[in-house]
Image (tube, rainbow, N blue to C red):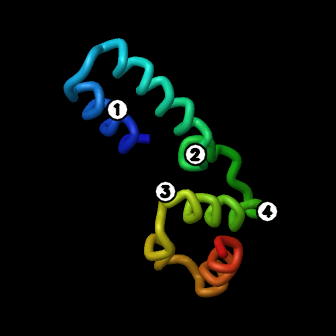
Amino acid sequence: MEKLIKDYIEFLKGDGLASDKFWELDKKIKADRKNPGVLLQDVRRSNFHVHLASLVGYEVISMKDLDGFSDETKEIVERMVR
C-alpha cells in the first residue's frame, strides 16, 4: 500500500491538467483495488498458498521474497503460478 501511495503522489506532482490527473488517478485506484496486495485480508492456513501464489503472479512479491519459507511452500507456489 505504501508503494501505491508514493506512486500516486509522484503521479499527481507531474505535469498536466488537474482534471486529467484526477480521472487518470481514479482509473489507477480502481485497477489497484483488484490487486491481491490490496485485497489480501483473510489469510488462513487453508488458503495461504493460494494467496502467496496470487501475490507472486501479480508481481507484488517475487519468488526471491519467499527465501525464508520452506522448500515445500516454495514448490507449491511455483506450481500454482505456472
Contact between marks 3 and 2 (CB within 8 A): the answer is: yes
| 3D distance between C-alphas at marks 1 and 4 | 34 Å
As rendered, which of 23 and 54 lies closer to the eye?
23
Task: Give the mark nearest the N terminus, 1 or 4.
Answer: 1
Q: Quadrant of residue 45?
A: bottom right
Residue at the spot of label 2: 35
Secondary-structure class at tag 1: helix
Q: Residue type at mark 2?
A: Asn
Q: Quadrant of residue 8?
A: top left
Task: Give the mark nearest the N terminus, 4 or 2.
Answer: 2
Q: Residue type at mark 4?
A: Ser
Q: Residue at x 50, y 28 (%)?
A: 27
| 3D distance between C-alphas at marks 3 and 4 | 21 Å
As rendered, which of 25 and 40 lies closer to the eye?
25
Direction top: furthest residue: 19
Residue at the spot of label 1: 8
Contact between marks 1 and 4 (CB within 8 A): the answer is: no
| 3D distance between C-alphas at marks 1 and 2 | 15 Å
How crowded is the residue under tag 4: few (<14 C-alpha within 10 Å), some, or many (20+)? few
Is 49 placed above or below 6 here? below
Label 3 or label 4, whichever lies nearer to me, is: 3
Which numbered dot is residue 46? Answer: 4
Residue at the spot of label 3: 60
Task: Give the mark nearest the N terminus, 1 or 2.
Answer: 1
Q: Quadrant of the C terminus?
A: bottom right
As rendered, which of 30 and 49 lies closer to the eye?
30
| 3D distance between C-alphas at marks 4 and 2 | 20 Å
Label 4 or label 2, whichever lies nearer to me, is: 2
Horizontal side of residue 19 vs 68, given as left or right: left
Q: Residue at x 47, y 68 (%)?
A: 62
Contact between marks 3 and 4 (CB within 8 A): the answer is: no
